[in-house]
Image (spheres, rainbow, N blue to C red):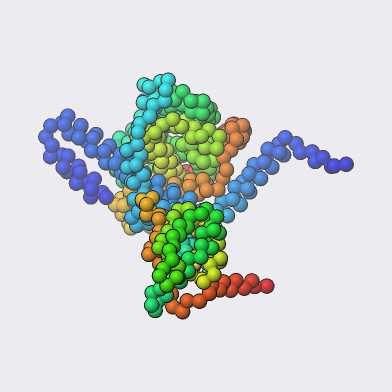
Amino acid sequence: MQKVERVSATGKYFKDLFDGIVAIYKGMRLTFIYMFAPKVTEIYPDVKRPLPQRFRGRFAFLYDKEDGHMLCIGCYACVKVCPPQTIVLETHKGEDKKIKVDKYDINIGECISCSNCVEVCPVGALEMTHEFETATFEQSDLFYDMHKLAKYVEKPNMYIPPEPPKIKK
Amino acid sequence: MEVLVQLYTAILSLIPFEPVRNAINMLVPTLAIASMVLGIVFILIWWERRLIAFVQARLGPNRLGPGGIFQSFADALKVMLKEDIVTADADVILFTIAPILVFVPGLLVYSLVPVGNGMIVSNVNVAIFLFLAISSITTLGILMAGWSSNNKYSLMGGIRAVAQAISYEIPLLLSIVGVIMLAGSLSMVDIVQSQNVWNIVRQPLGFIIFFICSLSEVNRIPFDLPEAESELVSGYNTEYSGFKFAMFFLAEYINTFTLGALCTTLFFGGWRFPFDNLLGDIGLQLTAQLGIVWFILKTMFFFSVVVWIRGTLPRVRTDQLMAFAWKYLLPAALLNIFVTSIFAAIGFGVFSR
Ligand code: SF4
Ligand code: SF4
């Protein structure tokens, strides 16, 4: 059986008044404290927050820094694995019977930054960069060719995924 | 500041023709105060947005000018460039008059408020009555806007505004009676001059009632039922755009500033420096020379309190609103009059005139 507390109408009147004042006091005190609390807003274009190590922005098409040759061997693996199928690759067989890459275009507006192409590449010719401000005024500026995607690296080697961040206990 | 007033009087006395002089004497102070208020309103809009952001641990507009102070000018410019849309089947005449009827009384009442020592457009001897009479026209404008928009949300907002105004006007008037009794005058200048001890000391209950009721009168947040965004889209001004909307928007801020100005004048010593009569000559000089500065500082303080309340309290329900006015505020106001009149009759302590 629940005990029903009987309050007279007058008692309820003053209790309501008192409760209201207490509630307003509590709320006003809290907001006053928050007025001077540190703000959570990031002043984005002026102050950029550090990106995580494995951040996936626009990807880059790597060249060797020493002699400037491209690392891509034209194996079409990235073309097949790309979910939105945005990579356009054209090759031809050179006189030395090696495959030469003529065209390596992507539409950055279609790319979903999934990093599949980077992980599948057998020679590590692609890399995810930290660049993410790729908005443009013209739609045509979204098309990146291999020169626009170029990045020159020293000591190119196979793609090795960076160490995952250590989780503290 | 007194120098300015003296300079103005001197220049005025050079004009030979009596009617011309009178006409100029009406026009110049009115324009001066109207432009002062409109200038302040732009700062108020920015200040409200900043303060409400601080309460919510944000930064608010901070890009345009130092601390973002020009943001409201940019917004005003944007609003003026917008298309002026009139709803189909709207009552065009009322639709056009309504924003004017809301905006003009808000500015007009500043002719009755003393903003500094001797800085008042017209020192009417029934200033408080005139003030309340003029400012209650605003409600009519809101109802007009709601009715003429041909929109159910607008109409609902207008109806709510009237219901609210009727309930809250009564305790508002009654809470001022105590102040009038202590000053023995309805003139604002006399009321300020009678406050050797600020009225807040003598009328704390009256002040609380007055503050709550005027919050409701200017439709600020715990009582913003006429424009309840979550229920009525935007209430009475749903269908307005462009310059007409800007007038509603500015009127809201002007009215909030008026709230602060009235609180200052009636309960916090108007343009007077705190305890100026106790500080002797320095205090009197501060009051006389820099009256307008103290007035604006005090008014800004009350505006900030209103914004602080906006950041804290949720909107009340309509039945709660009515119950609060009739069950709590009205008896409290009557009690306040009763106690004040007894003390004033005995001439007890700070209540002696
Ligand atoms: S990151 Fe993903 S979507 Fe973008 S090009 Fe590579 S595979 Fe395609
Ligand atoms: S997977 Fe690597 S090597 Fe193969 S085509 Fe793509 S970029 Fe070139």
Q: Residue at x 37, y 37 (%)?
A: B246
* Residue B320 x/y as whole percent: 61, 35
Q: Residue furthest right?
A: A1
Could you tell me if residue B350 is visible in this image? no
- Picture quarter containing residue A4? top right
Please name whichever residue, B43 or B286, is drawn nearer the observer in this view of the structure: B43
Q: Quadrant of the C terminus of chain B?
A: top left
Q: Residue at x 35, y 36 (%)?
A: B82
* Residue A27 x/y as whole percent: 59, 50
- How many numbered dots are placed on residues in this image? 0
Q: Is residue B166 left or right of residue A21?
A: left
Query: Compared to A159, does A138 lie above or below?
Result: above
Please name whichever residue, A72 or A90, is drawn nearer the observer in this view of the structure: A90
* Residue A115 x/y as whole percent: 54, 62
* Residue A108 x/y as whole percent: 44, 56
Please name whichever residue, B103 or B349, is drawn nearer the observer in this view of the structure: B103
Query: Compared to A101, does B259 lie above or below?
Result: above
Q: Residue at x 40, y 63 (%)?
A: A102
- Picture quarter containing residue B31? top left
Could you tell me if residue B164 is visible in this image? yes
Q: Residue at x 38, y 50 (%)?
A: A139
